[in-house]
């Protein structure tokens, strides 16, 4: 991923989640590889104090199952690294928040924050999936679902172009 896109995502974290820590870039793989049964995380960044920040894009309603998925990821990352973990979930205004805000008892030190972004995150999701395909990373079920949903979630005037791009990506991923 080029420097411009990394800076763009870091700026999203700073703006949407009021993040003040110094984010230095992507976290190294040895810090972020988790059990394959666990949600693998979105874009995971590292701060200058070695804390981890995971930027996620949520297109489904945020319910207890979604919350549990992020708690499990935070606990696995904490267990592996023993550092503060922040899970930042960015969602469009159409996502319903169904899980109650509550304290979660855990030995891990983590926070999970949600933010609605005024822009449409479909372009970021599309870019993220495209990047996975270009790197030869297999798409998971969530990625496939996102490719199916992106044309519907995008701006009406862009649906045709988004559908074509998603079909091309799906074709490349299935080869």
Image (cartoon, helix red, strand yellow):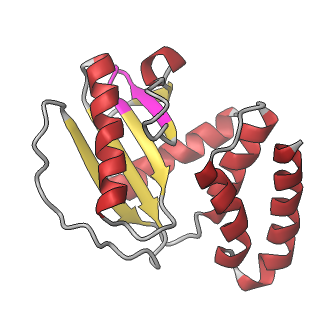
Residue 12 horizontal/vertical position (percent): 48, 52
Residue 19 visible in this rendered orientation of the protein: no
115 relative to 42 in the view: left or right: left
39 relative to 17 in the view: left or right: right
50 relative to 13 in the view: left or right: left
Q: Look at 59% across and 69% down and name the residue there.
A: 120
Q: Nearer the viewer, residue 26 or 125?
A: 125
Residue 25 visible in this rendered orientation of the protein: yes
Residue 11 horizontal/vertical position (percent): 49, 47
7 relative to 93 in the view: left or right: right
Q: Is residue 155 above or below residue 149?
A: below
Q: Look at 85% across and 77% down and name the residue there.
A: 160
Residue 30 horizontal/vertical position (percent): 48, 15
Q: Quadrant of the C terminus?
A: top right
The magenta segment: 44-52
Q: Which quarter of the figure has residue 102?
A: bottom left
Residue 109 among those drawn in magenta: no
Q: Quadrant of the N terminus?
A: top right
Residue 51 among those drawn in magenta: yes
Q: Which quarter of the figure has residue 163?
A: bottom right
Q: Is residue 50 above or below residue 134?
A: above
């Amino acid at each position: 991923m080029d420097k411009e896109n990394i800076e763009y995502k870091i700026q999203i974290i700073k703006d949407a989640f009021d993040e003040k820590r110094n984010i230095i870039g992507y976290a190294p793989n040895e810090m972020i590889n988790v059990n394959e049964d666990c949600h693998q995380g979105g874009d995971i960044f590292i701060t200058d104090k070695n804390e981890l920040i995971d930027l996620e894009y949520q297109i489904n309603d945020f319910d207890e199952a979604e919350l549990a998925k992020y708690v499990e990821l935070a606990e696995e990352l904490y267990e592996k690294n023993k550092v503060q973990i922040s899970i930042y979930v960015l969602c469009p205004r159409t996502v319903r928040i169904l899980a109650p805000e509550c304290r979660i008892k855990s030995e891990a030190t983590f926070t999970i924050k949600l933010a609605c972004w005024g822009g449409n995150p479909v372009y970021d999701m599309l870019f993220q999936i495209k990047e996975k395909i270009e790197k030869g990373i297999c798409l998971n079920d969530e990625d496939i679902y996102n490719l199916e949903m992106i044309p519907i979630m995008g701006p009406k005037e862009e649906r045709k172009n988004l559908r074509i791009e998603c079909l091309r990506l799906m074709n490349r991923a299935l080869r």
